[in-house]
Amino acid sequence: MRYRNPELGEKLAAEYVLGTLRGRARARFEALMRYDPALRSRVTDWEAKLTPLARAGTDIAPPTRVWNALSQRIAGEARKPRWWQSLALWRGLAASGAAFALVLAIVIGVAPEAQPPMSMVAVMNDTQGQPAMTVSWPSMQAVREPYIRIKVTQQHPTMAPGTEWELWMLPPGKDNPVSLGLITTDVDQVMKLTPELASRIEGAWGIAMSIEPKGGSPSGTPTGPVVMKGPCVKLL
Amino acid sequence: MSEPLRDAQASRLAELLSQSALRNQSAFSELYSLTAPKLFGVALRILRRQDWAEEVLQECYMNIWNHAADYAVAKSAPLTWMTSIVRNRCLDWLRRPQQEATGDEYEIAVEAWQDENPGPVEQLMAAGDAAALGHCLEGLEARQRQSIMLAFFHGMSHSEVAGHMKQPLGTVKTWVRRGLERLKGCLEKGENP
């Protein structure tokens, strides 16, 4: 379907919010919406229009067991550090120092002369602690169009059918990971960044990759297993 | 609810959401007690089963707890953002084939509201915060209004609405589409008089 057609986009957004867009069409629309700010804002408009209707009915207090279960779950989550706050990320790096140096040489070595040199790199280890991917980027002030370069160094990268690889940056502090986008298993890829992501990535302290359903994480934070991750290191 | 009261409530909810993003459990608890009865009503009307509605509500609040930080970029009113999370989760839930509710359950749930009876439209018009929506719904043809209400309020699909109204699927689809177009035109006229 031609979702670019504004009339069709408007009709689908309305039926999405109304709830009559169902099944695969709904899933497909959700996937498209994630990458299409215009479509997303149509949906937000319709939500603002129709949502008061959803709440016009009678309020019904849920049984106390719902809150009891919830409060236990959030208390449990609050105690458990999130994976991106875990020290294992750093320990992994120390263990693979030699491999790290090797990968670093690759990253710096192949940067074509004409392009500004890479200023940051994240060497990401797989769950066995082996370097599996590097993500590097130049100083974002030095380039007109911000980008990151992704190199898959894993021996036999495989992407299971129906899944995607989604790249995340770990912003400073305890903020949630921020999606950089979906990548392929190609050895060498370049991904353009929006100016907003470009300014945020310069403060990132780590990069991670998770396995997500088709279309990427439905929630905006990693939902699938995190199979590669590594801290960002300054090169220049 | 009067306008200043409503704005005060919205900014309180936004504040509680941002506190929840910082893992403040007592803020989250207050957020829950202020919003759960509304959202449980929304879930129950769509799912028509208490156990499903409880499960979905719990999941949605876990989502809200974990993604409260995303609210900052959502560009909607806090309750709209939270209601959309619940509605979308309910519709996902119904998508699972084994979760299809039987016809009987629809009838029971739908009896609670008939197009002719004082119901959501009247409540909306009285509510103030959505008087424009209530007014525009009133302006639709009865069958357009009823099909939109069944779809939105009770989470019915096109074919469920068609079954309920005993009308061909294509006819119902047209009512829904035309009704939405007219609703949009009416609401936007109200925004820019």
Image (cartoon, helix red, strand yellow):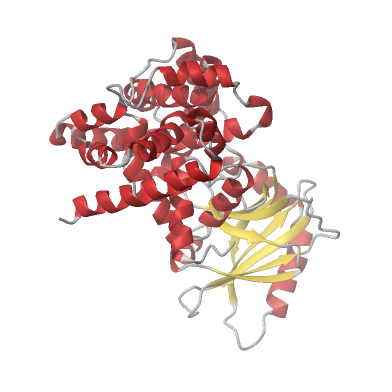
Q: Return the residue nearer the eye: A7 or B17.
A: A7
Q: Which residue reaches farthest right?
A: A156
Report the side of A140 relative to A109 (left or right).
Answer: left
Q: Position of residue A147 (x, y in %)?
A: 56, 72
Quadrant of the frame with the C terminus of chain A: bottom right
Quadrant of the frame with the N terminus of chain A: bottom right
Q: Position of residue B186 (x, y in %)?
A: 26, 50
Q: Residue at x 44, y 62 (%)?
A: A7
Q: Position of residue B131 (x, y in %)?
A: 21, 37
Q: Is residue B12 visible?
A: yes
Q: Which residue reaches farthest top?
A: A64
Total count of labels: 0
Q: Return the residue nearer the eye: B67 or B103.
A: B103
Residue B43, above or below A162: above
Residue B17, above or below A91: above
Q: Residue at x 52, y 35 (%)?
A: B162
Q: Position of residue A215 (x, y in %)?
A: 63, 53
Q: Is residue A173 visible?
A: no
Q: Residue at x 31, y 27 (%)?
A: B120
Residue A105, above or below B115: below
Q: Return the residue nearer the eye: A150 or B108.
A: B108
Report the side of A122 relative to B170 (left or right).
Answer: right
